[in-house]
Amino acid sequence: MAQRLVLHIGVQKSGTTYLQQMMQDRARELAAINVLYPVPPRRPDAGRLNHHETASYGLLGTEYPWVTEERSAQEKAWWANLRKQVRDWSGTAIVSAEALSVVRTDAARRTIEEFGVPENTDVFITGRGLGKLLPSVWQQHVRNGHATSYDRYLRQLARQRDRGWEELEQDPKTHLWRAFALGRLAQRWAALVGPERVTLVTNPGSPADRLWHRFLEAIDLGDTSGLPAPDTATTVHSGVTAPEAEVLRAVNGNLMGEGWDRASTRKLRTQVIEEFAGREKRGPRLGVRSGFRDRVAAWSREDIDDLRESKVRIVGDIAELHYDPESEPAEPTPAEIAEAAGTAVRAAADWAPSRREAAKAK
């Protein structure tokens, strides 16, 4: 049985995928210092990096609002394998699954107990401020094919938060606040393992290797000098800018309205995003809308106060979580949105012949 479990629970959009890539790429070197980073055997999606999250679907199932009973059943074997690897290991085991940040208390307790070392489980949270998290999640929704407007998304989150923490802790559909209210998240897990066993690591931003070194410092694996240093230019997600996100959302909505199949929609969206990445002038990054900035600032202050009260360990600078409305970028102009739309039209025109050829082949 593992002597110690390092349980990294996210949160989403805080550098989790980057850290998972670093650990997966260094699994052999970690094993050499008696640290296990479990990798699934012979999976068709071996190139993916959220293996531990998908394994947790097999344990927690529909605790996650986006996981069906069928998907949970598909992942039960991988969950059993992951749990066995941890239980059979003699040293430190690392499990990293950002979805665990959204689960309710009973599911969190069950997860800890299933790994079999509750008295030696250390919980680690990687965090960013709301000014980064909220735009980043909406952008990811758009990249995944959704067409909800940014304003509607922010209004929905505001309505949820106004319901109060008792409801937010219990309603499966309010999972985003269970993760992004970092103080409440820290308190929830501290209640299970003790505040001395919960650490929040702030994401210092670019270059990405700063987060890796800070995370290594926090989890304290002993002598890690044998681990290959990361490439400072390494990134995992390539974002889209504010005008590009607006165009991509419109593309998603139009394709849904035309009844396009999911596979074709995904391929065209990928083509558009690739064309966006090649633009020289891409417009401002996505920030918080001007009409919501005061509310986000108030939420940020409340969450940081809750984090301080939690008494968990902080690695990094808690000031990095602070939301400053004055640092927000300008909102995109109609001209910038039009230029992004032109790029999308060109991408669609370039992609259309290959789609027609594929249709003929069928």
Image: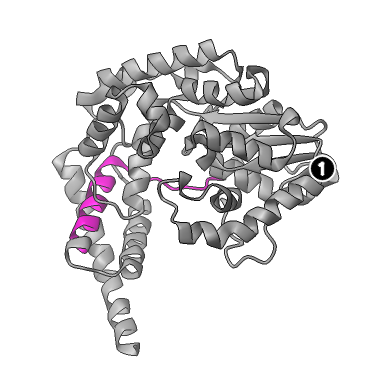
- Tell me where residue 18 sits by quadrant: top right
For image coordinates 75% across by 35% down, the residue present is 117
Crowding near the residue tagged with mark 1, few <14, some 14–19, many ≥20 C-alpha atoms within 10 Å: some
- In the rendered picture of this protein, how many numbered marks are placed on residues? 1
Principal SS element in the magenta part?
A: helix
Of 158 and 191, the residue lying toward us: 191
247 part of magenta stretch: yes
Q: Is residue 318 left or right of residue 37?
A: left
Q: Quadrant of the C terminus?
A: bottom left
Query: Residue 8's spot in the image, x, y percent?
Result: 61, 36
Q: Is residue 141 left or right of residue 91?
A: left
Looking at the rendered structure, the kind of residue marked 1 is: Met
230 part of magenta stretch: no
Of 116 and 259, the residue lying toward us: 116
Q: Is residue 166 left or right of residue 309?
A: left
Q: Quadrant of the N terminus?
A: top right
Q: Which residues are magenta?
A: 233-255
Query: Residue 335's spot in the image, x, y percent?
Result: 15, 43
Residue 257, visible in the rendered structure:
yes
Query: Residue 214's spot in the image, x, y percent?
Result: 64, 28
Label 1: state its secondary structure.
loop
Q: Is residue 271 above or below residue 340?
A: below
For image coordinates 39% across by 39% down, the residue present is 172
Of 74 and 286, the residue lying toward us: 74
For image coordinates 29% across by 52% down, the residue present is 146
Q: Is residue 35 left or right of residue 167?
A: right
Query: Residue 285's spot in the image, x, y percent?
Result: 33, 37
Q: Which residue is mark 1?
A: 1
